Image (tube, grey):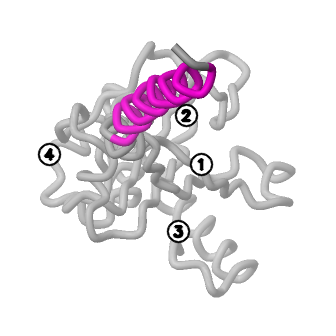
């Protein structure tokens, strides 16, 4: 066999090997691309004391679109987005733009995981479908989280969730005053 024939065979074999590898990678590319689709979610929270409201608490986080709502809430809890309160008791009402009800559950400092009133196994892309993805955590002081959760469950369609919850625990005048102060400081905020 001549040197020229040898090199032609080598190039043909290399070309076939490269072509097979290239086709193999292109077949996997759409699946790999789907796994990398990220959803950007805006999270925000109430202030826990006067010195805590000097800066915005809003953050944008990116998670894979197939992440479950439960996994997202766990990620937020583990990232310590919500401050720890001395005494180990803090109650937060979870509000979501992706739900028909305003408040979807309760996250408490003393609980290992949040309690939600909707299917938390659904992916965030499905949960926020057609909506601007936002989660807001309303601070309910050191209120009993079981009581707050029960009140959320019985409130019809969760209208005026914070006021109803605070009425139940006797703090609605404080909530109205806090909302009034917020409206003075941030008149463009849709939360007050």
Residue matched to label 1: 61
Span shown in magenta: 3-26
Q: Residue furthest bottom?
A: 187
Residue matched to label 3: 176
Q: Residue at x 17, y 37 (%)?
A: 119
Please name whichever residue, 139 or 170, is drawn nearer the observer in this view of the structure.
139
Please name whichever residue, 59 or 151, is drawn nearer the observer in this view of the structure.
59
As drawn, the label of residue 154 is 4
As drawn, the label of residue 76 is 2
Query: Reading the chain from its start, which is encountered first: label 4 or label 1?
Result: 1
Give the CA distance from mark 1 to mark 2: 9 Å
Q: In front: mark 2 or mark 3?
A: 2
Give the CA distance from mark 3 to mark 1: 30 Å
Question: Are circles 3 and 1 on residues that touch, CB within 8 Å?
Answer: no
> For the residue labelled by badge 4, is the local secondary structure a helix, a strand or a loop?
helix
Query: Reading the chain from its start, which is encountered first: label 3 or label 1?
Result: 1
């Amino acid at each position: 066999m001549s040197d020229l024939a040898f090199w032609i065979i080598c190039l043909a074999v290399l070309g076939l090997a490269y072509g097979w590898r290239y086709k193999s990678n292109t077949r996997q590319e759409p699946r790999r691309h789907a796994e990398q689709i990220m959803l950007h979610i805006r999270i925000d929270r109430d202030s826990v004391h006067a010195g805590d409201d000097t800066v915005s608490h809003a953050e944008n986080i990116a998670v894979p679109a197939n992440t479950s709502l439960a996994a997202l809430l766990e990620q937020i809890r583990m990232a310590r987005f919500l401050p720890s309160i001395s005494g180990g008791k803090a109650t937060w009402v979870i509000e979501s733009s992706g739900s028909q009800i305003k408040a979807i559950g309760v996250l408490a400092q003393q609980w290992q995981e949040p309690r939600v009133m909707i299917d938390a196994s659904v992916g965030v892309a499905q949960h926020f479908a057609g909506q601007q993805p936002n989660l807001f955590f309303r601070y309910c002081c050191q209120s009993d989280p079981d009581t707050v959760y029960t009140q959320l469950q019985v409130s019809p369609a969760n209208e005026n969730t914070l006021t109803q919850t605070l009425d139940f625990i006797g703090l609605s005048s404080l909530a109205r005053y806090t909302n009034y102060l917020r409206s003075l400081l941030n008149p463009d905020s849709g939360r007050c």
